[in-house]
Amino acid sequence: MKKIFFTPGPSQLYPTVKKHMKKALSEDITSISHRGEKFQKIYAETVSSLRDLLEIPSKHKIFFLSSGTEAMERVIQNCAAEHSYHFVSGAFSKRFFKTAQELGKTAKKAEAKEEGFDFAKINIPKQTELICITQNETSTGVYIPAEFIYKLRKRNADKLIAVDTVSSAPYVDLDYQKLDAVFFSVQKGFGLPGGLAILIISPKAFQKANTIISKGISTGSYHSFISLDEYAVKNQTPETPNVLAIYLLGKVCQDMIKKKIEKVRKETEAKAKLLYDFFESDGRYSIFVPEVILRSKTVIVIETRVDSQIIINHLKTKGLYVGSGYGEYKSKQLRIANFPAHSVGDIKRLINEVRTLNIQTATSSP
Ligand SMILES: *Cc1c(COP(=O)(O)O)cnc(C)c1O
């Protein structure tokens, strides 16, 4: 039986990954020197493919890190000497906020209510250097539309804005020119193995790292913006990187460029609609995020009347793996990833299984 992972990370591999992995192994990618020409070429190709796919401005720098969690730490260290401000809408944005505190910064936050953030009312303190936004909160399925972020940008021209797009990239279409730091890891929307993250920073964010250093404040060590850039200009990383992961990311970006990113995005929206329409029509379920425009297209969070584990276990017997609720919602919710690796057929198969699921029978079976 073909297994399909609708788990929100790690998730289903992008369909071309196996083929690229075989090719990479046959080319001994995993044994080549990370200081040699062959690696530099792979590095340059992946960076250029990312720029093309996401339309990243040429002056923005692209760095390779090991995880989305690491990216939060690097952004805080290099973009805020003292003051950060956070939009908290679930566990990942809370992690971002806590990271700032753990690094000794003065971190302030706005917490989302049921209906999201009231952006017009939020007053960001004057001394704030960095505003942190989790654009797609994977734990709750709360999505912050780009227009909201651009409005914040307008009203806070003097501050840096960092955006976590870990579970929305490459679906989310952002104007990077308006943003100072954007990061994502590759085990979600890119359908790749975990252990690699991308951080995109503006010239202003890079300048800020220099300012922080000139104040005698640490921006970190080997993965400070300055150190990362020293190597990036040579198409290298400070440490021995996961060469295979960088190679695969480049290939998947090229596949998505060939397919056309607009098509990937339209398909994501069509699949999200199938899921939301179904769960809205089935009385046994309700959608967690009430406000339609704040509903994530890539992580669909559904409330269940019965213990969600029963549903999850039943679907497993059909080869379909969906996520449970996050933290306190573990047994009350389902979290379903809708990434580019999931086809319309995969989504229909999932919906069909859920539709025909007889919870009474599922409960009594071991
Ligand atoms: C998964 C996730 C992270 C953490 O990424 P890792 O690569 O697992 O460290 C951060 N933010 C969001 C929104 C996520 O979904």
Image (spheres, rainbow, N blue to C red):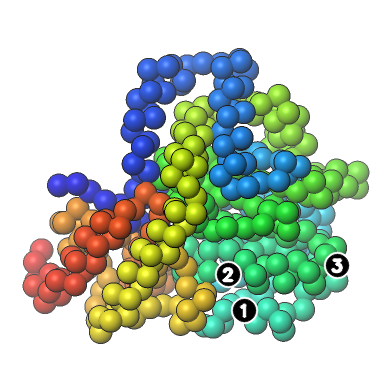
Answer left or right for 240 relative to 271: right
How many numbered tags mark residues here? 3
Q: Nearer the viewer, residue 164 or 170?
A: 170
Of circles 3 and 2, the one toward us is 2
Answer left or right for 278 relative to 340: left
Answer left or right for 242 relative to 347: right
For disc 3, the marked residue is: 127
- Percent from the top left, x then y, of residue 317? 15, 56
For disc 1, the marked residue is: 117
Q: Is mark 2 within 8 Å of ligand 1?
A: no
Nearer-N-terminus badge (3/2): 3
Q: What residue is at 54 percent from the left and 58 percent from the top?
A: 172
Of circles 3 and 1, the one toward us is 1
* Mark 1 neighbour class, 10 Å CA radius: few under 14, some 14 to 19, many 20 or more: some
State if disc 1 and disc 2 touch (CB < 8 Å). yes
* Mark 3 neighbour class, 10 Å CA radius: few under 14, some 14 to 19, many 20 or more: few
Give amino acid for label 2: Ile
Image quarter (top left, top right, bottom left or bottom right) of the C terminus? bottom left
224 shown above or below 335: above
| Real-space Cα separation, disc 2 to disc 1, in angstroms | 9 Å
Give amino acid for label 1: Phe
Kindly identify which numbered label has been placed on residue 144.
2
Dot 3 lies on which element?
loop
* Mark 2 neighbour class, 10 Å CA radius: few under 14, some 14 to 19, many 20 or more: many
Give amino acid for label 3: Gln
- Percent from the top left, x then y, of residue 314? 17, 63
Dot 2 lies on which element?
loop
Q: Nearer the viewer, residue 243 or 351?
A: 351
- Percent from the top left, x then y, of residue 109? 68, 72
- Percent from the top left, x then y, of residue 279? 30, 76
Identify the image quadrant of residue 35.
Answer: top right
| Real-space Cα separation, disc 3 to disc 2, in angstroms | 24 Å
